[in-house]
Amino acid sequence: MLGTHEADEVTQDIFVRTWQKLGQFRGESAFSTWLHRLAVNVVIERRRSFAIQRGADDRRRRRRSTC
C-alpha cells in the first residue's frame, strides 16, 4: 500500500504521462481503456524503479556491515 504522499505522486505521474501521450491515442479503443492501461503501466514502472532502488540500498547496507 502507498502512503498519501506516494499516492499523490503516482496520481501526478499518471496525469503527466497522459498529457505527454495524448497525441498517441488512436481511438481504436475506449478512452477509459487506454487511460487505464497507461495508469497501470505507470504503476508498474514505479514499482520496478522502487524495487531497483531498494535492492541498491540493501547492497549498500550489506557492504557497510561487512566493513
Image (tube, rainbow, N blue to C red):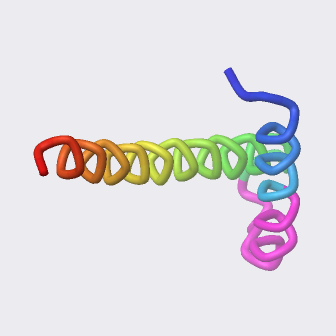
Magenta part of the chain: 15-28
Query: Residue 60, how many percent across, how many down?
Result: 28, 53
Question: Residue sitting at 67 percent across and 20 percent down?
Answer: 1
Q: Is residue 20 magenta?
A: yes
Q: Residue furthest top?
A: 1
Query: In the picture provided, is 67 more to the left or to the right than 48?
Result: left
Q: x, y (%) of residue 32?
A: 85, 42
Is 59 or 55 nearer to us in this picture?
Answer: 59
User: Which residue is at the front of the view, 31 or 4?
Assistant: 4
**Would you place residue 3 above or below residue 10 in this image?**
above
**Does residue 30 show up magenta in the picture?**
no
Say whether residue 39 is left or right of residue 32. Answer: left
Please state the horizontal and vertical placement of residue 37, each as a whole percent of the image.
Answer: 66, 45
The residue nearer to you, when weighing 63 against 23, is 63
Above or below: residue 28 compared with residue 21: above
Residue 33, image quadrant: top right
Residue located 44% across and 47% down the image: 48
